[in-house]
């Protein structure tokens, strides 16, 4: 799913189903955050939004990890008793760990010339 090719597109106002979005200027890998559910969605041009594990949202958009953390933490803060709160925090921690480990391993790999 994360490596799937897509045609670049820029969503218009009618293409944005949620109130919070991370729109990639390159025209791919767009994300939406559903505040009612506390869940990230991958936005596609010709398909319905696809629910994502928060860790997959981080892997899809590592340059926006700060925004993904903020959206998640604010949602948990505002919905402490919601059954999704613990799962969202667990997904966030798992995703952040995966990204850190990936880049740490890449930094230690020898450069091939």
Image: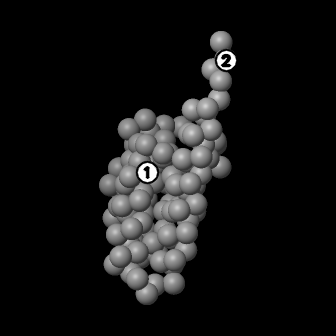
Q: Judge from the rendering whether residue 36 lies leftward or rightward of residue 46; answer left or right.
A: left
Q: Which mark is residue 11?
A: none
Residue on which disc 2 sits = 112
Taking depth in this image into account, of 51 and 93 the one nearest to the observer is 93
Local crowd size for mark 1, using a 10 Å CA cut-off: few (<14), some (14–19), many (≥20): some
Q: Secondary structure at mark 1?
A: helix
Residue on which disc 1 sits = 65
Instruction: Please give the name of the residue rendered at 51% of the width and 62% of the height, measured from the top-left corner.
Output: 92
Residue 18 visible, this angle? no
Residue 43: percent from left, percent from top: 49, 54
Instruction: Please give the name of the residue rendered at 57% of the width and 40% of the height, measured from the top-left corner.
Output: 104
**Extreme residue in the bottom direction:** 81
Residue 109: percent from left, percent from top: 65, 29
Local crowd size for mark 2, using a 10 Å CA cut-off: few (<14), some (14–19), many (≥20): few
Looking at the rendered structure, the number of numbered marks drawn on it comes to 2
Q: Secondary structure at mark 2?
A: loop
Q: Judge from the rendering whether residue 12 lies leftward or rightward of residue 62; answer left or right.
A: left
Instruction: Please give the name of the residue rendered at 42% of the width and 66% of the height, measured from the top-left corner.
Output: 72
The colour scheme of the drawn protein is one colour
The first of marks 2 and 1 along the sequence is 1
Residue 49: percent from left, percent from top: 52, 60
Task: Estimate the spatial distance between the alpha carbons at disc 2 and disc 1, rounded to whole Å.
Answer: 28 Å
């Amino acid at each position: 799913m994360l490596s799937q090719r897509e045609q670049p597109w820029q969503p218009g106002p009618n293409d944005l189903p949620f109130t919070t979005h991370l729109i990639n200027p390159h025209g791919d890998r767009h994300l939406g955050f559903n505040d009612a559910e506390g869940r990230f969605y991958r936005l596609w041009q010709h398909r319905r939004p696809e629910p994502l594990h928060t860790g997959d949202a981080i892997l899809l958009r590592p340059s926006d990890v700060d925004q993904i953390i903020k959206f998640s933490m604010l949602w948990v803060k505002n919905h402490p008793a919601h059954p999704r709160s613990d799962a969202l925090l667990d997904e966030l921690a798992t995703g952040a760990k995966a990204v850190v480990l990936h880049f740490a391993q890449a930094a230690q790999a020898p450069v091939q010339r």
